[in-house]
Amino acid sequence: MLCTYLLCIILTTVHLTNAIDTSDGSPDAFFTPAGSNPQKLPPPGADYYTLPNGCPIDNPLGTLRLGNQLNGNLLLQDINLIDVLTHITHERIPERIVHAKGAGAYGVFETTHDISNYTSLAFLNQVGKTTPLFSRFSTVAGEKGSADNVRDARGFAFKFYTEEGNLDWLFFGAPMFQIRDPAKFPSLVHAQKRDPSSNLKNETAFWDFFNHNAEGLNFLMRLFSDQGTPLSYRYTDIHSINTYKFTQPTGEFKYVRIVLKTDQGVRNLTHDQMTTLVGMDADFSTRDLYAAIDKGDYPSWTVYAQIINPEDAESSPVNIFDATRELPESDFPLIPFGKITLNRNPKNYFTEVEQSAFQVANLVPGWDVSADPIVQVRLFPYGDTQRYRLGINFPQLPINRPFYSYNPTRRDGANNIINLGNLPNYFPNYNGPQIVQPAQYRQTAEQHMRWIGNVTNFQSQITDSDFDQPRDYWNQLADMGPDQQGNFIYNVASSLSGANKGVRQETYALFRKINGDLASAVQNRTEGLVLKKCQAAKAMYGQMDNSSLPM
């Protein structure tokens, strides 16, 4: 069944047309210098092959050489050859440190329910109103060339081109995050990357990190269930993980978390199905999303809000500022307010997907960050990584550009596209446009936000409550299907069996705090796989140094 589905996706993915569209989607995609254009242009439907300065050349595949033969010496004056070689050695930009492998699509957000009593967000101020958006979906830990369907978290980023600026949502496939202390971010990333010595993925490092940061067990329960291997991006629910704020011009606000429920239904793979699919098509999720949109089967998600009154935040059964905890729907019911539909594929992957840049700091009036420490720290590095990848002027790239922006102090820098001509580069200034009152500013909600205290160097501690939600989810797996708890044990064992003995023993002890039967089952299955791996390795390679085995 899986193989048949995969074959259909591959066969219906891409159909090329004879007409090539070279536009980049920007309103000024074709720029003509002031005055008339003196250059003789090719006839419609044709092109000249030119050097970068526009000079036509007659034989771009030839090379200038001494002698009309294959072994002639090449000449440095062959400008075309030098230029094309120089360009190809410079055409790669740094890949994202996380979320490197991804797929993108355009779409629309439609407001389906009135929630103006919660927020002044302009794109939500009328039922039926639509807002264009661009989305990028990705795995998290793998490199750009890694497989789509491996066991990993999934990132879901949306850029809403609203009338009051670009609003970016950077969400997650799981309902919670791995950490709640911002200083742990670098270690979290490195523990999932390649070993600095062997350049191999290191199960010992992965499990050792979470053994020392047990608040992440709630996330691991999802990652090592079949939810950790979704069939594709289209069949995944999406979560904000962090608590944000819906704000009003009066300074009033509500805390909010966002949930997107897939309208295609959730579909996951077992570990063995995942392994088979990765071997057949490492780019399956990317191909599936592109193919669905290409044939008009537009994926969509219903968008919900979980609203928390500020006065209820302190008495909440779950700390709403703890990104490692899920907000229970029984206490904070889902309130529908919109629908996202993806309906157009990018024309050029690099220009539109690779150069797309999302950052939590892209806020608009009616939406703000909360005191959640993880969302607070995300305000900086997400933008900074784009400055490293794309340069300081990345917001000017067509895919990242809002409908309108004006700030005369943001000038110059590499790859500047919009430099405001001869306007003075300070503010206010004698020659600038008249600054008028907008419909609303970005509000800073004051209520419930008056802080008085001492500066402290704080790190959260693990308590018994950190094991409550993992325990609840373990019990829920039994209700999800007769195989789900068994699949979880097998999935954990398949990974944990690659770690060393000391780390494995620490992991069993942590699982024992969730459920004794769970810990025993994980230990028995894992140690059985360790023994099999050792026996298989010895049979294949003969007597081996024990240090190379997961003993």
Image: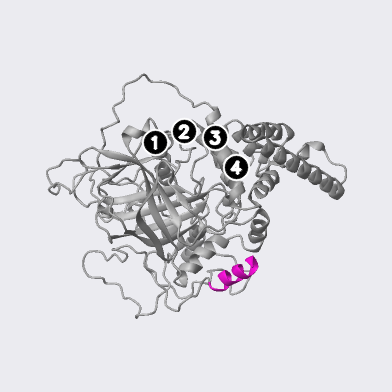
Question: Which numbered disc, 3 or 1, marks the residue that appears first in the sequence?
Answer: 1
Q: Position of residue 542 (x, y in %)?
A: 87, 46
Q: Is residue 345 left or right of residue 496?
A: left
Please identify the quarter of the rendering in which residue 211 is found.
Answer: top right
Report the amino acid beneath label 2: Pro
Q: CA distance from mark 3 to mark 1?
A: 26 Å
Question: Which numbered disc, 3 or 4, marks the residue that appears first in the sequence?
Answer: 3
Magenta stretch: includes residue 54: no
Q: Which residue is found at the position 82% from the left and 48% from the top?
A: 536
114 and 15: which is toward the camera = 114
Report the amino acid beneath label 4: Trp
- Camera-near label (1 vs 4) is 4
Q: Position of residue 204 (x, y in %)?
A: 67, 37
375 and 428: which is toward the camera = 375
68 relative to 407, above or below: below
Does any portion of residue 351 appear in the rendered image? no
Q: CA distance from mark 1 to mark 4?
A: 31 Å
Q: Are marks 2 and 1 in contact (CB under 8 Å)?
A: yes
Residue at the spot of label 3: 468
The span shown in magenta is 1-12
381 relative to 163, above or below: above
Residue at the spot of label 4: 474
Residue at the spot of label 2: 182
